[in-house]
């Protein structure tokens, strides 16, 4: 399975010189199996970059099929949706799978509201030319997506929950835990450990440098150290720090990686836009 | 008076190596009077850096005035990240055209609902107030005299003429030209046949724009498309620099600033656009500048930077 990071930034897309090496686009991660089946996680601005690549292939001809998993619907995870060009080509089949964001509000209604006429000239999902299905999932349930086995779980994110994923393909496993904050990062929740157990790669929220975390406790994001604790306890083989703070320049992320590497035997790297990894 | 560009990009923010010089953040311009009054036009992602600067500079909580052209995402997305909103005692007055049936506070507050953002507008420390603007109905905010101008964009948009310190500038974004498409309150999948009424409406909108811009020193204009791109997407609601130049030449403005750059236009292409239209502007007596993030311009012949 090949994994490619198209957007690794949290909260806000950052442009400029200080963000060139790790990248300023918000979250979007692509997984492709050896047989060529593709899965996308989250639709931040990074998805607009992936879209350019996809349009050069079957998606440009209206023959593309793509399942997209959403962790949640905070803007940095869906802001690429109105600009994801495969939606504009008739014939493409795109599934968007995610949990209802809050009780009493469906995923479909939320995405419709994102494309409401005052916010977007698209004026609703029905005006996307591609075939689009919005599928509400129940965190905890397994999902059927061709080529991938997917387990899900709800993890706390400030005053709400996000969906974390454990994805297995080609005999390898990737765990995606973005936008999570445990009651105590020294003692991560069992649901997170279970999704990350023995994973070949753990992608974990590392919004805050450890020394910044105390100021932002309760805001729904983890310090880099949280991913280390999850990886060590769950026996994950490699840790990708993800969802970098918009205030974290390339040099600051380098420092976080150095400090994190020094405290664990688990191989650690910071996810960088455009980079790929064969799991 | 001077103006500073905090976000010059259209549609969505574009990080990366290709946008380092012109900038990747979306629409936001700050105007300053000689006396120090501040006016913010549009609340795109450029507003985050502006907010951080305002908080650094402030000795006390401020009252900020924000004019919105319309409420498409690229023009309001910076608002939840505007750090003065989190300073108790701050007041933020937002001025906008009503483009939907909902009240302005519902539309603008809607982007901070729980499903989209962790903290709703009602919960932030700053006090927000919302004012509806009407094309042609002018008003005064401190040193600034403001006239909203109707523009041609899906579901409506307004430009602003802003007079201050004996000079003037105008913000004309987002707008399509006034020929092929009349934008209304519905989705366009392509160009629709114009009725006679539509042609009359377009001509009236164009005439009012030219009249309001007459003699303005500096016009910041939506020039999202190059002509070949416009030809493919005439129903998207954006203009070309050529169309902006035509309006500005008729209104006899001194200077045109290209703005709301397409996400796909990287720095090298922007350099070519800047050079091409500097020449085309000179041919009709208009000074054409291409905006970049961080650019500050004095307004008026005698203008000096504050």
Image (cartoon, rainbow, N blue to C red):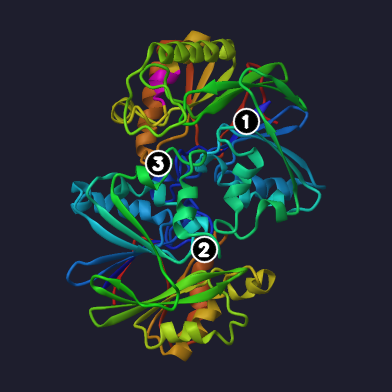
Crowding at mark 1 (Cα within 10 Å: few <14, some 14-19, many 20+): many
> Which label number is shown at residue A264?
none
Provide the residue designation for mark 1.
B3
Provide the residue designation for mark 2.
A101
Q: Is residue B272 above or below residue A96?
A: above
Q: Is residue A64 above or below residue A154?
A: above
Image quadrant where one finds the C terminus of chain A: bottom left
- Could you say whether the residue bearing mark 2 is in a helix, strand or loop? loop
Image: magenta residue range: B239-244
Front tag of 3 and 1: 3
Residue at (58, 36) in percent of width and height: B101
At which x and y percent is residue A76?
A: 49, 57
Image quadrant where one finds the N terminus of chain A: bottom left
Chain identity of mark 1: B
Q: Is residue B145 above or below residue B295?
A: above
Front tag of 3 and 2: 2
What secondary structure predominates along the stretch shown in magenta? helix
Asked if marks 3 and 2 fall on the same chain, the answer is no
Provide the residue designation for mark 3.
B263
């Amino acid at each position: 399975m090949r994994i490619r990071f198209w957007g690794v930034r949290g909260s806000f897309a950052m442009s400029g010189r200080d963000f060139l090496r790790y990248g300023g686009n918000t979250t979007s991660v692509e997984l492709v199996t050896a047989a060529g089946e593709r899965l996308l996680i989250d639709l931040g601005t990074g998805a607009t970059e992936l879209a350019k690549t996809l349009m050069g292939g079957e998606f440009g001809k209206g023959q593309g099929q793509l399942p997209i998993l959403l962790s949640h619907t905070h803007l940095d995870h869906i802001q690429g949706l109105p600009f994801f060009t495969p939606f504009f080509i008739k014939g493409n089949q795109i599934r968007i799978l995610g949990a209802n964001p809050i009780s009493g509000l469906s995923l479909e209604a939320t995405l419709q509201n994102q494309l409401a006429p005052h916010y977007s000239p698209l004026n609703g999902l029905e005006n996307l030319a591609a075939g689009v299905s919005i599928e509400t999932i129940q965190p905890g349930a397994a999902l059927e997506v061709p080529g991938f086995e997917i387990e899900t779980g709800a993890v706390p994110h400030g005053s709400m929950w996000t969906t974390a994923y454990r994805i297995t393909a080609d005999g390898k496993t990737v765990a995606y835990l973005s936008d999570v904050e445990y009651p105590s990062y020294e003692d991560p929740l069992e649901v997170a450990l279970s999704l990350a157990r023995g994973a070949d790669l753990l992608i974990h929220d590392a919004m805050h440098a450890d020394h910044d975390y105390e100021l932002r406790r309760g805001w729904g994001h983890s310090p880099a150290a949280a991913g280390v604790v999850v990886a060590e306890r769950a026996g994950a083989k490699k840790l990708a720090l993800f969802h970098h703070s918009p205030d974290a320049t390339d040099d600051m992320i380098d420092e976080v990686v150095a400090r994190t590497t020094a405290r664990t035997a688990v191989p650690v790297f910071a996810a960088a836009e455009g980079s790929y990894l064969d799991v | 008076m001077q103006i500073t560009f905090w976000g010059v990009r259209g549609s969505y923010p574009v990080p990366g190596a290709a946008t380092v010089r012109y900038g990747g953040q979306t629409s936001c311009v700050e105007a300053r009077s000689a006396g120090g009054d501040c006016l913010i036009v549009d609340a795109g992602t450029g507003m985050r850096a502006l907010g951080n600067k305002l908080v650094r500079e402030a000795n006390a909580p401020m009252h900020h005035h924000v004019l919105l052209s319309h409420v498409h995402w690229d023009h309001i997305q910076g608002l939840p990240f505007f750090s003065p909103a989190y300073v108790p005692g701050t007041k933020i007055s937002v001025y906008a055209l009503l483009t939907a049936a909902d009240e302005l506070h519902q539309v603008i507050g809607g982007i901070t609902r729980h499903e989209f953002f962790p903290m709703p507008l009602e919960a932030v420390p700053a006090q927000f107030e919302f004012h509806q603007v009407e094309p042609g109905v002018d008003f005064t905010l401190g040193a600034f005299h403001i006239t909203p101008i109707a523009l041609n964009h899906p579901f409506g948009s307004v430009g602003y003429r802003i007079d201050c310190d004996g000079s003037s500038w105008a913000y004309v974004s987002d707008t399509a030209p006034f020929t092929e498409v009349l934008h209304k309150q519905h989705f366009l999948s392509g160009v629709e046949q114009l009725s006679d009424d539509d042609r009359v409406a377009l001509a009236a909108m164009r005439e009012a724009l030219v009249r309001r811009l007459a003699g303005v020193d500096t016009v910041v204009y939506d020039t999202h498309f190059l002509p070949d791109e416009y030809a493919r997407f005439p129903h998207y609601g954006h203009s070309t620099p050529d169309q902006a130049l035509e309006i500005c030449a008729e209104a006899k403005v001194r200077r045109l600033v290209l703005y709301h750059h397409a996400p796909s236009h990287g720095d090298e292409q922007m350099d070519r656009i800047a050079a091409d239209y500097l020449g085309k502007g000179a041919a009709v007596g208009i000074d054409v500048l291409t905006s970049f993030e961080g650019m500050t311009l004095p307004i008026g012949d005698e203008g000096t930077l504050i």
